[in-house]
Image (tube, grey):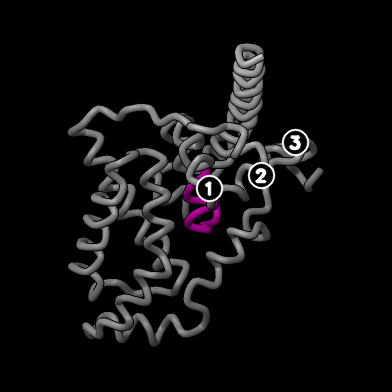
Amino acid sequence: MSRGLCRGGYDFGHSPIGRSVASVVTDQFPAILRAAQAGEEPAIAQLWRALNHRVVRFLSARAGDAAEDLASETWLTVARYLHTFAGNEIEFRAWIFTIARSRLIDSQRRYRRRPIEVDNPRALEAHLSCSDTAQDALDALEADAAVAMVGSLSRDQADVILLRVLAGLDVARVADIMGKEPGAVRTLQHRGLRRLREMLAASVQESGAQEQDEQGVTR
């Protein structure tokens, strides 16, 4: 079992997603940022390509079909205020996801959020191992089904896990975005992972029962 998982720990920086996020624009970021702030479209497009799919996945877990529209609103805000940003690549990611979360909260104040269901729990279960369910579930966040299941957690639990994994942010930055203490973020992460594991097990069990019923009918 991976280090610290049973105690609520997870080495986000060493997960496949954590590594890919950490190298979004490599050491070229300062030059890319300067070019984007100067209005050079190739540089702006490079930033968009590097992060937009993760922004959409973050939003889709909480907003469903509205995710694309909210992502567009996020990037419009980014374009409007890009000239004011100063910082490194990690701080840029934190800034982008802070804006995305703000757009999400504004939207949810206007519309009641509808629950998102996972259509095929067995497809998600295929990503999991018996020894390390929660870690593999997080590594499987590239799958839409996994993102949808994280969206079934409480709002704060989902935000913590998605910001840690999809945005690749550390506890301190997530705490700053959410206006919480780092200890509270760690607690939310632990509870969210535990709840995710429970939901995965229940969904796979239910899917298996349905398959057995269907096979019984066809015989």
Report the front residue among 215 and 209.
Answer: 215
**Secondary structure under the numbered disc 1 in the rendered image:** loop
Q: Which residue is mark 2?
A: 127
User: Residue 143, labelled with which disc?
Assistant: 1
Does 151 lie within the magenta span? Answer: no
Q: Residues within 10 Å of mark 2 (few under 14, many from 20)?
A: some
Looking at numbered disc 2 in the image, what kind of residue is underneath it?
Answer: His
Q: Residue at x 62, y 42 (%)?
A: 137
| Nearer the camera: disc 3 or disc 1 | 1
Looking at numbered disc 3 in the image, what kind of residue is underneath it?
Answer: Cys
The mark that comes first in sequence, 1 or 2, is 2
State the quadrant of the C terminus: top right
**Secondary structure under the numbered disc 3 in the rendered image:** loop
Residue 192: image quadrant is top right
Residue 37: image quadrant is bottom left
Report the front residue among 188 and 152.
Answer: 152
User: Residue 148 at x, y = what percent?
Assistant: 46, 37
The mark that comes first in sequence, 3 or 2, is 3
The residues colored magenta run: 161-171
The mark that comes first in sequence, 3 or 1, is 3
Asked if disc 1 and disc 2 are in contact, CB closer than 8 Å, the reply is yes
Report the front residue among 177 and 113.
Answer: 113
Q: Residue at x 44, y 42 (%)?
A: 159
Q: Is residue 138 left or right of residue 83?
A: right
Looking at numbered disc 1 in the image, what kind of residue is underneath it?
Answer: Ala
Asked if disc 3 and disc 1 are in contact, CB closer than 8 Å, the reply is no
- In the displayed orientation, state which residue is furthest to the front: 219
**Secondary structure under the numbered disc 2 in the rendered image:** loop
Q: Which residue is mark 3?
A: 6
State the quadrant of the N terminus: top right
